[in-house]
Image (cartoon, grey):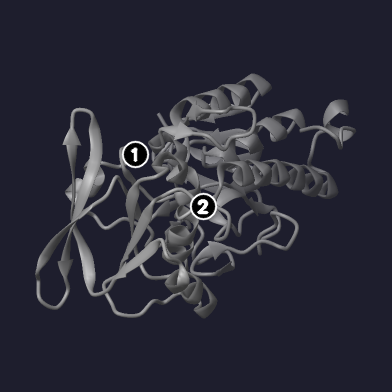
Amino acid sequence: MSETRHTKTLIIGSGPAGYTAGVYASRAMLNPILVQGIEPGGQLTTTTEVENWPGDTEVQGPDLMVRMEAHAKAMGCEIIGDIIVELDTESRPFVAKGDSGNTYTADSVILATGARAKWLGLDSEEKFKGFGVSACATCDGFFYRGQEIVVIGGGNTAVEEALFLTNFASKVTLIHRRDELRAEKILQDRLLKNPKIETLWFHELEEVVGEDNPLGVEAVRVKHTKTGEITEIPAKGVFVAIGHAPATELVKDKLELHNGGYVKVKPGTTETSVPGIFAAGDLTDHKYRQAVTSAGMGCMAALDAERWLAEQGDAAEPAPEAANEPESA
C-alpha cells in the first residue's frame, strides 16, 4: 500500500555523495530520508580494489559502500530501497514520486544520483568489467605497472587517461575510429610527443579477449573502419574513455545544466538554480569524478541544506557538535 512520507531533507542517490550527505544531515538533526536509487552504492559497487580512499591502503569498492551505508544509518539517516521516478521542483514542499508508489515530500532536496561511464555495449566488454576493462584510469591504472594497455576514444577524457596511464604502463595504445582527435590541442601535442603512446587511427574495438580462470584480459581485437580488417593487439588492460553521462533524467528540464548535461551549481557551494535543491558528486562534477571529492560535496550539500532551511525558519536547532565543529572531518 502506497504512503506519503515527509522529511526536512530528501537525499536522492546512494554513492559517496549521498551517504556522506546522510551522515551530515543526520548530525544536523534534519531527520533525512535517503532513497537509494537503481544502483545502491553507485559506481563503486562495480569496482574491485580501491587504493585511493584516505585511510584505507586497499579496500573493495562494494565493502566501502556497505560501510558508508552503515555509517549513515548509525547517524540516524533513514535509508529506503526505492527509485525516484519523478521530482516536482516547483511545489513547496518538493514532491518526489517513487517507483514503489510511495510519495516523498521534502523541505529541501539533495541530488546525488551520480554519473555513469559511457560504454560501447559489447558482450566481451561487459564480461571483463572490473577484470581488465575499466572506465577510470585514476582508479585502476596503478594495477597495470609495466603492462601494455589500450585506451578507447579520441576526446579530452581519452587523451588525459592515456597520458596518465603512461605513469604505469610500458606501452599505451590509443585506439580511435577517426584520423584526428577531438581533444584540446595542448593535450594532443602532449600525447603525440609521448614515446610510450602509440595511436591507432581508423580503428574501433571489436572484442575484448581474455582468460576465464582466472578472469582477465589478454588482448583486444580491433577493426579497421575503412577496410574491415581485424587486428589483435596484446593488452592486459582496456580503458574505455568515451565520456560520462550524468544521471540527470529527473531534473534535465527543471534545473540549469552545463558542460554536456551536468547540474550547474553556484561556485563554492552545492546550490542549484532552484532554491532548496542542492546537488553533489558526479552529477555536478565533470572534472574530478573521484569518490573522495563526491563525499566532500555530500558534506557540503548537507551543510548548505541545513543553513538554507534555518534561513527559511524550517530547520531544527543544529546539534551542538554539528554547529560548532569547523575542524570536523
Q: Residue furthest front?
A: 195
Relative depth, front residue between 63 and 159: 159
For the point 45% across and 50% down, which residue is it?
A: 137
Structural crowding at the residue carrying mark 2, measured as other residues with C-alpha within 10 Å and reported as few (<14), some (14–19) or many (≥20): many
Amino acid tagged 2: Leu
Asked whether, in this view, residue 321 is left or right of residue 35, the answer is: right
Relative depth, front residue between 273 and 141: 141
Which of pointers 2 and 1 indicates the residue nearer the eye? 1
Asked whether, in this view, residue 291 is left or right of residue 232, the answer is: right
For the point 47% across and 25% down, which residue is it?
A: 63
Q: Position of residue 163 (x, y in %)?
A: 47, 61
From the viewer's perspective, is residue 312 above or below residue 245?
above
Structural crowding at the residue carrying mark 1, measured as other residues with C-alpha within 10 Å and reported as few (<14), some (14–19) or many (≥20): some
Whether residue 319 is visible here, answered yes or no, is no
Q: Quadrant of the C terminus?
A: top right
* Secondary element type, mark 1: loop
From the viewer's perspective, is residue 194 above or below residue 14?
below
Query: Which residue is the site of mark 1?
Result: 130
Asked whether, in this view, residue 20 is left or right of residue 88, the answer is: right
Q: Position of residue 5 (x, y in %)?
A: 56, 34
* Secondary element type, mark 2: strand
Query: Which residue is the site of mark 2?
Result: 87
Relative depth, front residue between 27 and 82: 27
